Image (spheres, rainbow, N blue to C red):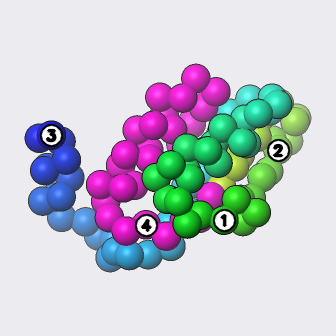
Amino acid sequence: MADQQDAQTRQSLIEYPCDFPIKVMGARVDGFAQAVIDVVLRHAPDFEPAGAEMRPSSKGNYLAVTCTFRALSQVQVDAMYRELTAHPMVKVVL
C-alpha cells in the first residue's frame, strides 16, 4: 500500500489522462501477443486490441507488441508494467 501512495505523490512529467504506448517484447511463440493484450485489457478495459501493433525481429525469433492505451494515472501504468514484467513470456517492457 505504501508503494501506491508513493506513486500517487511522486511528481510525474506525464500529464494524465493521455495516450500511452507500451512496447512488450518476447519470444515469437503462439499466444504471446494475446497474453500481452490480456494484461493490457485488465488494466485498461477500453483498450482496442485491434490497435495493437506487432513487429517481428529481423531474424524472426522475437516479437514486439506495442499497445497504445488511454492512461488515467501513474498508478495504472505502474501496475500494468509490473504485471507485464512478471509474465513468464515477456522479456522486455519499454
Residue 52 x, y percent position in the rendering: 71, 59
What numbered label is drawn on residue 71? 4
- Marks 1/3 in contact by CB < 8 Å: the verdict is no
Where is residue 30? Give x, y as percent. 82, 31
Q: For this rendering, which residue is in front, 86 or 45?
A: 45
Which residue appears at 64% of the width and 27% of the height?
A: 89
Residue designated by label 2 = 56
Q: Tell me which label, 2 or 1, sits earlier in the chain.
A: 1
Residue at (18, 64) in percent of width and height: 11
Q: CA distance from mark 4 to mark 1?
A: 13 Å
Left or right: 24 with respect to 32?
Answer: left
Q: CA distance from mark 2 to mark 4?
A: 26 Å
Q: Residues within 10 Å of mark 2 (few under 14, many from 20)?
A: some
Check residue 39 in the rendering and tell me which mark sits there, or answer none.
Answer: none
Q: Earlier in the sequence, mark 1 or mark 3?
A: 3
Inspect the image, locate mark 2, and give the three-letter code of the amino acid beneath it. Answer: Pro
Residue type at mark 3 is Met
Residue holding disc 3: 1
52 is within the stretch colored magenta: no
* Residues drawn in magenta: 67-94
Describe the element under mark 3 as helix, strand or loop.
loop
**Is residue 94 visible in the rendered structure shown here?**
no
